[in-house]
């Protein structure tokens, strides 16, 4: 079975990643690619040099089975409506439909939401939580990259655990691909190399996705205290989540919880080797960002400071992969009854 | 006035940084440099190519005014005693004398402390807190790099503030110079580049320095929940400290507190520009790691999430500079009544 | 059709890359993996976390269709003999059988060649030149990474062109993956980051492969003057080849020559867009190293300084990909009559 | 003695480096700093956070002893005239007055030269060649960064040596600081990291400076074949110069030549340790880019491939240091009879 897929915004990093993965997907025929400046895609994606593909203008698209949208938020709102109106299902890789609270959305995105009925219809596409709901849908809101990393890290802790759900401190460290393809003062190589830059440290938009999903799981209000930074990597993000236990917990107990929680999912993997207290530090079993770069995998690891009752969870994923375009393809697979891992079950590179 | 200074362990990164700074110090004559493999220092420090200096064996040293020790912990213990016995004052850049609780020290360094009387005598050399005590001393315990960054970030909050002192979550991000000059699997370039690696995430040794100093200031037990990582930078560390307020606080209020706390010190600088909520994110006033690389400066910045009552403090310094050899020189200046900033008041480079 | 393939030396970077590609090859069943320290491969290749594969000791291998060898030179000599003796064909990813001149080999590898009859039998596996000879073979000598880049860059110029074949100056710039998985002083992150390091600048071993193949094509002695460096990238190499024309040539003329030369090959691509003299410099059509990282592609580009009669050719490839394990798989495909691009026709990532 | 110095264009990387060095120069009082957007310099140079300095508009400057110009070429032409007219001497850090051939200049800079009488008056400020002429001057043309590296590498070979002066092949590798402070598609971090990018490979502007100076020294026309690239470093450039000998030469013979040539100069240093043919490759004595980052030093090293009669010379310097603002300060020292090394004799950092 083949489905016909279009990509809107194929010249950016997110659209280019969707394209790269779909080119190698056994059940996909590309319908079209759009961009603001129609032309050869390899002008924007040197990796695709020689592929022969071109983008077209958005107004030239035709109906197809599904479209992946890698567009600015405002453009997603209208394009989604237009696509749905012509019978094309939509996976929005952007932020247009991620929040359930309209007031939150309008405040943090600083604009009125012109298509709230679509937001109400959309499924929030964390496949490990809502994968079963996706098949029914014609509109999926693909989650934010940091939100994916934090939610996957914390979801197993939200039920039955003695933790302080109002004081979860999360540090996010992102590669610069997360800033998009547009040059800026912060991502200028001489400025960014050998540097770490904090940004949006108060009230980051992804915080609201995290709190929304974790509160649902916990059945009670959850507060995340999230601080993102850019680091001189290209792809991938690491979330370090500090959770305060209110009663003793142990690493083995938590590892079992995590393994059980994710046992049925192919893309979340738990680093559960024993953490020998006296092992050379380089062999402690924590995940590394670049092990998942270019892939749809999320690796989790954790530890417990029993002396201070702190749980620390590490989650790594690629903001263009499991935190972006590739999980969009996973959602597409689920929407169309394809094998969930179709086109996605490839390992990353090593080294780098 | 000139003082005669020796450096033990001059071939490592810490000893080399001490040497680089002392070469340009107006009140210093170098007495000697030691290393395990006596020879030209430029074999180990290519920046010093052409300087003509050589290291000697430790057994060939002679008395001088003061020695900076960049040695393994165990070697520091015995060398400090020997130096003091011949009338040479000691600034230990390592961890031998940093903790006031013997039980903590012996557990986290995993060895008996053979010279506890020296630990009892030593001043903990955070100059902003204990600078006045240093002049009297013959032995200074230079603080750990992460400890310096966290203590400087949190000290102003420890008094009179409505915060939860038992749940301070700190993420530390360090450049690889912090791992020392010895090659290892983790710091192998193909493995480390484009990566972030967590290590020692439970019960890190520097946690005990942080808790010791912050508890003193708070007059009550403080718990830090500290998670360190290596990032693909060379020099410098960033600590992100999450503090939970128990009553409303505001950014302007905290900035005033910080400015007042550090008003008399030349090396701690506060990023206190207004943080316009709608400013382009790149202009939010947070410090950048590389602005202080190669210097004795610590830059601090902070923000408040009033919605969630979180304070986040950013502190950056160079683990070989204000977190290492350069603050060692600052301590030396204080010990000998020199101008506090002698040889240290230089700005860093930009870009990089 | 499926063939059974073994990998000797699967824990190193080269063996790991062979493994990664073969895991996704439609015609391959893995027979076995060997290493000096048998155990889970993910201990050495974090990208393969969760794959469940283990290495075995070399003495435990069994016959299979073909083995890829990622071994030290000396080990390759004896292992190749043993494998051939049990009817297993061999693709040596190392240097054991690359040179036709025994004296050259023994001098530059600084040891006696104990199996010269095998060197005489082996085909030198630059597929664009010798692909047709590979099908017959039971032993292929996979070319060196820099040799591949330089030979592919220069081969089209070797016939009928008015150039000085004795004075070809080549600068090689390699990522640090080319140095292998073993930590060293040069590849220590703090030393290598933000640096460029020249090495083996006289009489580099790969020079002999270049001269051997180019002389064959030219029908006359060719001298390359080759200088390699390490740069702070992970994967991929760039060769910049300066060729002095002895009569006027033009860029369009050369581009046609290159296109014709490589028209039948899927993995060498020519950057042949017009080079507008006044175009913004970032749009000049030269290949970029990282466009081919992780792939079996080689991108070529060139320019002509007509004022000074210099031709400059740029060639990029991945030392583990088209310069290593992946071209090894391409040779395997040719040896077994599989589709030449089986398992290899995937594009690289962007960005990074 | 103190001189009063102004900097035009203080917000860019070159002007900021001049400022950083002059702030620490014992004989300098800053007269003024200009920029297109007057305001705090630390908005552009985070290293100078806390320095309290501001830029003013160019029209508000007043006469002073000398001005360093870090301006676009066209702006330099008119500003130089205006400054000289008010009795302020000029060191142009840009390209306005570097060439002796007006036709070359107008072609490669693609504009008419409106002040050729100034170009005729200016001294080309390679201090090792023309330092003695600078004292007399009121206008110095500071050399280009790549030109400095190549000229210092090749100058000693230009006299009495059996070399082919028409076929010198030079590869230039530059950090991204050389691209300036303005963000662009090429220097966007996700694009530049882990990459090497060639640019301006034909007829680079600095080629003409190299040929001009080397021809003067050789007393015969010299042709350089120069190919520049950007690599993912911040500061510093490496030039690899391939020179073809027409008769046998040896490394010791050349090292002596280089040592003699530069014996009277404090800032050029020769790596002349014996190059043991069988030494571990990391100990071959070639200079490293980052050993000179942030300094006014140029390190040279070389080797000879006696088998192929190739000489290869390595030269490293910082494009903002010895290839830019710092050599501008060295020229200033010479112009005013100050100690040549005043404010400049500091070593770089290690590591990084």
Image (spheres, coloured by chain):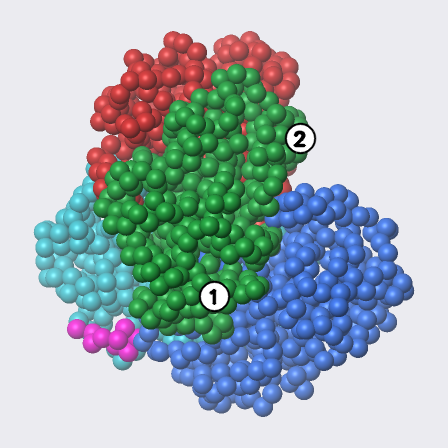
Chain colours: A green, B red, C blue, D cyan
Q: Nearer the viewer, mark 1 or mark 2?
A: 1
The reply, left or right, for residue A109 in relation to residue C208 is left
Number of other residues with Cα within 10 Å of mark 2, as a class: few under 14, some 14 to 19, many 20 or more: few
Q: Nearer the viewer, residue B144 or A189?
A: A189
**Quadrant of the image for the N terminus of chain D?**
top left
Tell me if residue C282 comes above or below residue B179 in the rendering: below
Segment tinted magenta in the rendering: D105-114
**Observer-nearest of B299 and D192:** D192
Q: Residue at x 26, y 75 (%)?
A: D110
Please state if C121 lies on the left or on the right of A304 as rendered.
right
Nearest to the observer: residue A168 or residue B58: A168
Give me the disc on residue A4: 1
Helix, strand or loop at label 1? It is strand
Pointer 2 residue: A274
Judged by its main secondary structure, the magenta piece is loop
Q: Quadrant of residue C28?
A: bottom right
């Amino acid at each position: 079975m083949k489905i016909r897929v279009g990509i809107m915004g194929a010249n950016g990093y997110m659209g280019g990643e969707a394209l790269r993965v779909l080119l190698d997907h056994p059940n996909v025929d590309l319908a079209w690619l759009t961009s603001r400046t129609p032309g050869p895609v390899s002008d924007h994606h040197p990796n695709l040099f020689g592929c022969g593909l071109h983008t077209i203008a958005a107004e030239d698209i035709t109906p197809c089975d599904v479209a992946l949208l890698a567009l600015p938020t405002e453009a997603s709102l209208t394009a989604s409506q237009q696509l749905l109106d012509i019978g094309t299902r939509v996976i929005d890789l952007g932020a247009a439909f991620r929040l359930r609270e309209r007031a939150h959305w309008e405040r943090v995105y600083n604009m009125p939401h012109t298509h709230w009925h679509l937001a109400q219809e959309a499924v929030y596409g964390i496949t490990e939580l809502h994968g079963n709901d996706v098949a029914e849908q014609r509109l999926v809101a693909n989650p934010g990259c940091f939100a994916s990393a934090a939610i996957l890290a914390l979801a197993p802790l939200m039920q039955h655990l003695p933790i302080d759900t109002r004081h979860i401190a999360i540090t996010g460290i992102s590669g610069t691909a997360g800033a998009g393809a547009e040059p800026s003062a912060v991502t200028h190589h001489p400025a960014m190399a050998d540097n770490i830059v904090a940004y949006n440290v108060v009230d980051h938009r992804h915080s609201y996705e995290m709190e929304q999903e974790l509160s649902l799981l916990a059945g009670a209000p959850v507060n995340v205290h999230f601080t993102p930074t850019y680091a001189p990597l290209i792809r991938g993000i690491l979330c370090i989540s500090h959770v305060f236990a209110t009663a003793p917990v142990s690493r083995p107990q938590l590892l079992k919880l995590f393994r059980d929680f994710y046992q049925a999912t192919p893309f979340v993997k738990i680093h559960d080797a024993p953490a020998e207290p006296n092992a050379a530090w380089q062999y402690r079993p924590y995940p590394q960002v670049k092990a998942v770069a270019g892939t749809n995998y999320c690796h989790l690891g954790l530890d417990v400071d029993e002396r201070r009752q702190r749980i620390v969870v590490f989650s790594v994923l690629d903001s263009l992969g499991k935190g972006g375009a590739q999980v969009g393809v996973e959602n597409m697979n689920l929407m169309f009854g394809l094998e969930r891992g179709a086109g996605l079950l490839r390992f990353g590179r090593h080294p780098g």
